[in-house]
Amino acid sequence: MKKTWRFRLAMLIGKMAMFAQKVLGMNATYFPGKLAIRICPDFLGQIEKPPMVIGVTGTNGKTTCANLIGNILVDQGYDVISNKMGSNINAGIASTLISGSSITGKAKHAVAVLEIDERSSRKIYSYIQPQWVLCTNLFRDTVTREAHPEFVFQLISESLPAETKLVLNADDLISSRLAPNNDRVYYSIERMPSDTEVCENIVNDMRLCPVCHEPLHFEYVRHHHIGKAHCEHCGFASPASQYEAAVDMASGVMTLEGTTYPLMGDSVFNAYNILAVVVLLREFGLSGKKISASLQKTQIVKSRYSSEVIDGVEVVTHMAKGKNAIACSCVFDYVRKEPGSKEIVLILDDYFDRKNSSENTCWYYDTDFEFLADPSIKRIIVGGVRAWDLKVRLLIAGVSEESIICTPSEADTPSLVQLDADRIFILHELYLTGAAMTVRNQIADRLRAGERQKKGEMPHDH
């Protein structure tokens, strides 16, 4: 595409904005790209892209997968640019491409790994045609932004370039049907001991066949609509998988075509993320042996998950994405299935809603708080301005009132933890990671000081 004067001006202004942000110690996120697109609306079309472009989209796991793909490619010697430090909307991707281009708009890197927001599909795929797009999954998300998964499905499906090869989860009955005319490969996980024949979750958005609308028959359910199903009326079924992995949670490994890979976590969500990354990179051209070697050097981002044993107590921080019923449900399910007794600190207020408006709490009632009504969970400390809304939901879920402690301030939660359980889980919203780490450090300090409260002592609501 011929570069216009608007593009050249936009590139110059974008570069200047990026330089200014660096001088001021700010991360170059979406702002330079926002300026560039405002000056030149088709900026993404005119800027040169790297020869290889990998897109990663989906409701949950796209940040983890995109970061892992980029890290492994760098470890294997590829020259990679990614929007790891930018946003995943069109302006953030524009900023990423500006940072990886010369002042004339020529690409300086061989590979781009781009995390792509689902709702930005039309604004991005119109100008960028990735060789591969990995879609991790499609679930219900923030209702005020995402509406319904079928709406997001249609948006992505209609926007994907015809020449893009798709890497899709065969166990996801929604995302596996994306862009049916595109070339694709499927990945899946073999049946696991923890699978059930009936969905235990409140939400299952694929109870009916998408072709004839008769009830689907599930051979097994992993969680929500993830599993294997078929329609006994019209023959619709989960697609056959080219890459089927065996997962051993107890050993922390996944095996695919004779190669083992570390899981870097013991939740099924993380297993799917690792499998998705492996399959994408196999399609890219890396051998299983090389991918496994690079994965051995990689860890989950500490802001999303951390674990440390202090004075015999495991202290875990785990992101439970606010306003995302599916992500929170999976985290709650993971916590209840962990061995030993537990205390939980819940910090789920949405930062932006708390700051600017009243928070929409309808997502609480799509979330499986029932999983927290488990005998292994001794108490739940809820911190934040929505603590009592969450208490109501926990009571409805069957959690005993005596085991729920509320405080309007996240900062007060560390002092309310009794330290008499085998594990302490701090489950936090994405934008309250800093607060969660402060809570974690204060609990860790108490444990290191040998401050163990006697069993049976119960602080009261503030």
Image (cartoon, helix red, strand yellow):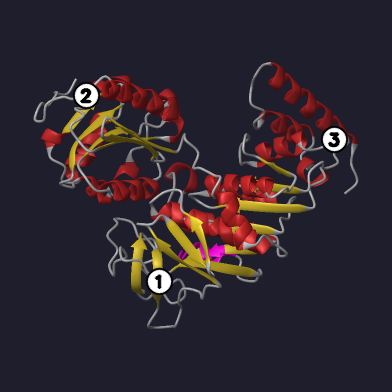
Position above or below: 163 against 424 = below
Q: Where is residue 128 in the image (x, y as percent from the top left)?
A: 73, 51
Disc 2 element: helix
Q: Where is residue 367 in the image (x, y as percent from the top left)?
A: 31, 47
Q: Would you name the residue on which mark 3 appears? A: 102
Mark 3 closeness class: few <14, some 14–19, many ≥20 residues within 10 Å: some
Q: Position of residue 16 (x, y in %)?
A: 79, 23
First of labels 1, 3 by sequence position: 3
The amino acid pointed to by label 1 is Lys
Q: Position of residue 17 (x, y in %)?
A: 74, 24
Name the residue located 27 percent from the left edge and 25 percent from the top edge: 447
Query: Residue 297's mark?
Result: none
Q: What stretch is highlighted in magenta?
A: 168-178
Label 2, label 3: how many angstroms apart (C-alpha)? Answer: 54 Å
Disc 1 element: strand
Residue nearest the viewer, comparing 245 with 180: 245
Name the residue located 11 percent from the left edge and 30 percent from the top edge: 455
Q: Would you name the residue on which mark 2 appears? A: 416
CB contact under 8 Å: marks 2 and 3? no
Mark 1 closeness class: few <14, some 14–19, many ≥20 residues within 10 Å: many
Label 1, label 3: how many angstroms apart (C-alpha)? Answer: 48 Å
The amino acid pointed to by label 3 is Ser
